[in-house]
Amino acid sequence: MKLYLFNPSLNRFAKTAQMDSNGKYTLEMKLDASLFALWFFEVFEPNDPMVRSTLQAVHSQLKVKTNVGGVARYENDAYHKTVFDYVERAKIFRRKFEQKSSR
């Protein structure tokens, strides 16, 4: 993985690699929150410099800079929850809770 998926010029791992019919491969360098799997699934130690630089890039570029916070799934992620989404989920949760409580 270090040999084929790490991009030294960007100092981070790629999201994916694709190989063409000639054996040449290209890296997809779009940042993706799933790169946390490098340490989460114990592929590498969390203190590995390549992992640290990758996760620092994810944090600095995908961090949601609002009061809500969090991390976007990938660069230019257009998925946004609205207050309406949370209100509807709360209503569903409350109905289920009330149904279980009334038993």
Image (cartoon, rainbow, N blue to C red):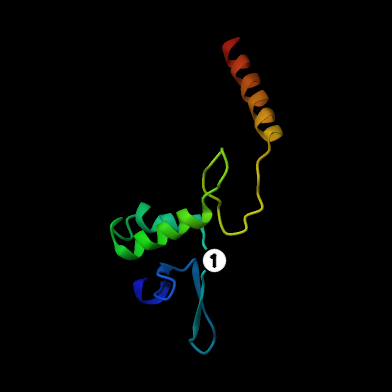
**Residue at x 28%, y 57% (from the top left corner):** 47
Does 46 sit above or below residue 81?
below
Residue placed most toward the observer, 48 or 61? 61
Which residue lies at the image location 51% right of the left edge and 62% below the top edge?
31
Q: Give the vertical position of 11 relative to 46 (above or below).
A: below
Crowd rating for badge 1 (residues with CA inside 10 Å; few <14, some 14–19, many 20+):
few
Q: Residue 52 placed where, x, y %? A: 35, 59
Q: Position of residue 33 (x, y in %)?
A: 49, 55
Position of 12 with respect to 72 (left or right) is left
Quadrant into which the C terminus falls: top right
What is the residue that sits farthest to the bottom in this orientation? 22
Residues 37 and 9: in front is 9
Amino acid type at circle 1 is Lys
Q: Is residue 65 left or right of residue 52?
A: right
- The answer to whether residue 4 is above or below residue 76 is below
Q: Quadrant of residue 9?
A: bottom left
Q: Which residue is mark 1?
A: 30
Relative image position of residue 49 (x, y in whole percent): 31, 64
The reply to whether residue 103 is visible in this rendering is no
How many labels sit on residues? 1
Q: Locate residue 2: give its quadrant.
A: bottom left
Question: In percent of the image, x 62 and y 58: which residue is there?
Answer: 76
Give the position of the N terminus as an image quadrant. bottom left
Tag 1 secondary structure? loop
Q: Is residue 83 visible?
A: yes
At 62% across and 55% down in the image, what residue appears? 77
Q: Is residue 83 left or right of residue 71?
A: right
**Residue lying farthest to the top in this orientation:** 102
Q: Residue furthest right?
A: 84
Camera-side residue of 100 and 28: 28
